[in-house]
Amino acid sequence: MNDRALRVLEQYDLEVISTRRGRGSYLLDTPDGLRILADYTGSENKALFQNRVMKQIRDGGYQRVDVILPNREGALVSRDWEENKYVVKEWYPGRECDTSSESEILAAVTNLARLHRLMHVEGEEAFEKSFTAQPPLSELHAKNVELKKIYSFIRKRKTKGEFERMFLNCFSVYSEQALEAEHLLHDRFQETSAGRGGLQGSVCHGDYDHHHVLLSGSELATTNFECCRFDYQVGDLYRFMRKILEKHDWNVRLGLRILEGYERIRPLNEEERQLLYVRMLYPEKFRKLANHYYGGNKAWISRRYLDKLQLIERQREKQEKFVKMLENQFHFGAD
């Protein structure tokens, strides 16, 4: 974001005392508190949906969320002369959750559980259902088709580097995990409207991680609701847990503490436990690396691809141990 973006502020009744750069944004000091000017890729309807979700959160007593402020015309999304889209949001002082601190990790997952309780809506008409996630089985099937296509592409390449050779050598292990996860979803997880109890009335953050939890003393704020939608809320827990556990070498004890911290506030039902287990079984990090490789420059393969693949391989046994722990914890597994 360049300085010209600040001209968008002319569309707001906002007294700005000072500005400073943030991560792809501008932080604005105002008499009413901190605000942020940020790029926005969504629609006006999505912004309205976000604000409705955050209003429900605030009505439940949780105030520190980044509500989008309207401009003078009453619109939540503003455009510059090049039709680039921006929003101005309420913001909060603080720093991101420290992923090396177990106490802050547990505070963040407790925060997530509290948010999930406040984001559950009663009744079919409580929110417009336009923003609903793809069913889990359809999502995993699409990812597996993609993985197979990437494998075929690499196998047919005449010239293969170290990354491609290692990818082909270890592909069968991750492919088996991916197919097992898809089969488990097919066998255990009913996606009929009558069988999707974990989704009924559930709105999730959609991108909950340590970057979006701000701490200031004992106070927490949750930001960046751009991906909020109707979905299984356990998906937020899965994403948060996976990213933390990757940073902690799939520490089983820490994983259990995260799960216990969440369930003290919001216990998971059987359907959600099955989905969490399947998500953890699925080799998501391997798939994402394959996807980035496939969409990148094939003429020059960065050393980072190989480094990341080697890390995935080093952590594989520990991840499998964690998944086995979940199987025992939830008293189920593959038949």
Image: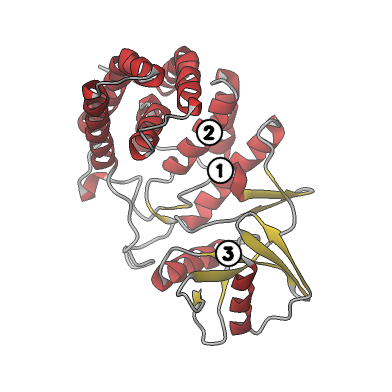
Quarter occupied by the C terminus: top left
Q: Amino acid at mark 2?
A: Lys
**Residue at image location 52% in from the left, 87% down from the top:** 73
The residue labelled by disc 3 is 38
Q: Nearer the viewer, residue 297 or 240?
A: 297
Q: Which residue in the protein does label 2 denote?
A: 243
How far apart are the alpha carbons under marks 3 and 1? 19 Å
Is 91 rendered above or below residue 331?
A: below
CB under 8 Å between callouts 2 and 3? no
Kind of residue at badge 1: Asp
Q: How is this picture coloured?
A: secondary structure
Label whose residue precedes the other's in the sequence (1 or 2): 1
Earlier residue among tags 2 and 3 = 3
Tell me the quarter of the image containing the N terminus.
Answer: bottom right
Horizontal side, residue 315 vs residue 69: left or right: left
Horizontal side, residue 289 vs residue 250: left or right: left
Amino acid at dot 3:
Ala
1 and 2 marks in contact (CB < 8 Å) = yes
The answer to which of 143 and 46 lies nearer the viewer is 143
Residue 318 visible? no
| Residue under pointer 1 | 209
Of discs 2 and 3, which sits in the foreground?
3
Q: Residues within 10 Å of mark 2 (few under 14, many from 20)?
A: some
Going 61% across and 72% down the picture, which residue do you hit? Answer: 4
Based on the displayed image, in which of its 4 quarters is residue 180 positioned? top left
